[in-house]
Image (tube, rainbow, N blue to C red):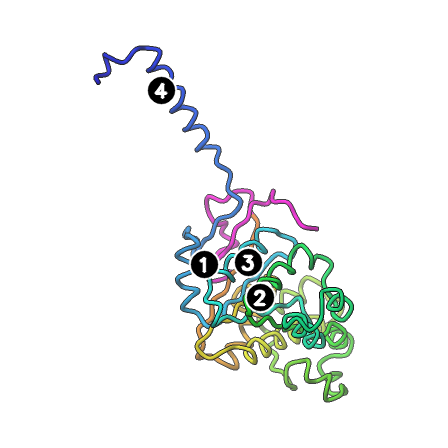
Amino acid sequence: MTRSSISKPILLTLSVCLLSLSTLWGQKKLAYQLFTQNGKKVTYGKMLKQINAADIILFGEFHNNPICHWLQIELAKDLPSEKLVIGAEMFERDGEQALADYLSGTIDHAALDSLVRLWPNYETDYRPVVELAKEEGIPFVGTNIPRKYASLVYKEGFEALETLSTEEKSWIAPLPIAYDPELPGYKKMLDMIAGHGGENFPKAQAIKDATMAHFILENHKEGGTSLHLNGTYHSDDFEGILWYLRERSPELQYLTISTVEQPQLKKLNEENKGKASYILVISESMTKTY
């Protein structure tokens, strides 16, 4: 069929349809975009290939962002379950037995809720990944220091931890912990508080980072994959938890994911480059869970 044989009404209809498709394509709304640390766009599939080659993945999240929690679930599903261990900042070590009992079916959810300090957004943001681990038989461990001991460091410094009982010490990283006050992240924390709280403020962060690193390694399976969920500030700029992991086990392969929000997803803002192995950019208009 030649152009001359097509009637004008048909040509007009085709033109309108093509214009409509073009408009719809131009108005495509994306919820997120992945970038490499240098700012190059990357697909989830390509990121997954590198993740599969890593021993330990630190997924830095925004606690109230649903895209983070959805992508964590998808990532956990796409990693070989027989070699996977999931760890999380959101569970403290003194509740580990109750968490293990829930995963094994020894206690129900009501009992877990009464025995463990669940975060206020647990039901919407963390229960789904816990339930996935339970259904698939994937080990899921809490890695964080009980908050009262981090508060103790904030008030009295690392020295106060020496007064704890043997059982209490089993819930934190072995003492004495290494600490580098010159790490940019810890120095930035001091600058932010402008002297309020003194030098113990970043130390309270460090004891969390050290404890999470310790229990990530304690539960890591040789030849397996450990996926750890934590706030971005615990692993951004390859510091925090990662610094402690590398101090103890430099031979392992580590990969980090950082979350940022931007008004546009076309390119990675300059200030967000270099934060992690991969940067998850989410539209700043995305709704929050709390």
Q: Earlier in the sequence, mark 1 or mark 2?
A: 1
Of the numbered discs in the image, which one, if any, rests on residue 133?
2
CA neighbours of label 1 inside 10 A, class few (<14), some (14 to 19), many (20+): many
CA neighbours of label 4 inside 10 A, class few (<14), some (14 to 19), many (20+): few
Q: Earlier in the sequence, mark 4 or mark 2?
A: 4
Residue shown at 71%/67% (left/top)? Answer: 108
Q: Main secondary structure of the magenta part?
A: loop
Q: Earlier in the sequence, mark 3 or mark 1?
A: 1
Of the numbered discs in the image, which one, if any, rests on residue 37?
1
- Is the Cβ of the residue at disc 2 closer than 8 Å to that at disc 3? no
> Position of 33 compared to 147: left or right?
left
- Give the label, 4 or 2, closer to the camera: 2
Of the numbered discs in the image, which one, if any, rests on residue 73?
3
Tag 1: residue type?
Answer: Gln
* Residue receiving disc 4: 14
Of the numbered discs in the image, which one, if any, rests on residue 82?
none
**Residue 99: x %, y % from top left:** 67, 72
Residue shown at 48%/36% (left/top)? Answer: 28
The residue stretch that appears in magenta: 262-290
Q: Earlier in the sequence, mark 4 or mark 3?
A: 4
**Residue 75: x %, y % from top left:** 50, 60
CA neighbours of label 3 inside 10 A, class few (<14), some (14 to 19), many (20+): some
> Real-space Cα distance between discs 4 and 2?
51 Å
Q: Earlier in the sequence, mark 2 or mark 3?
A: 3
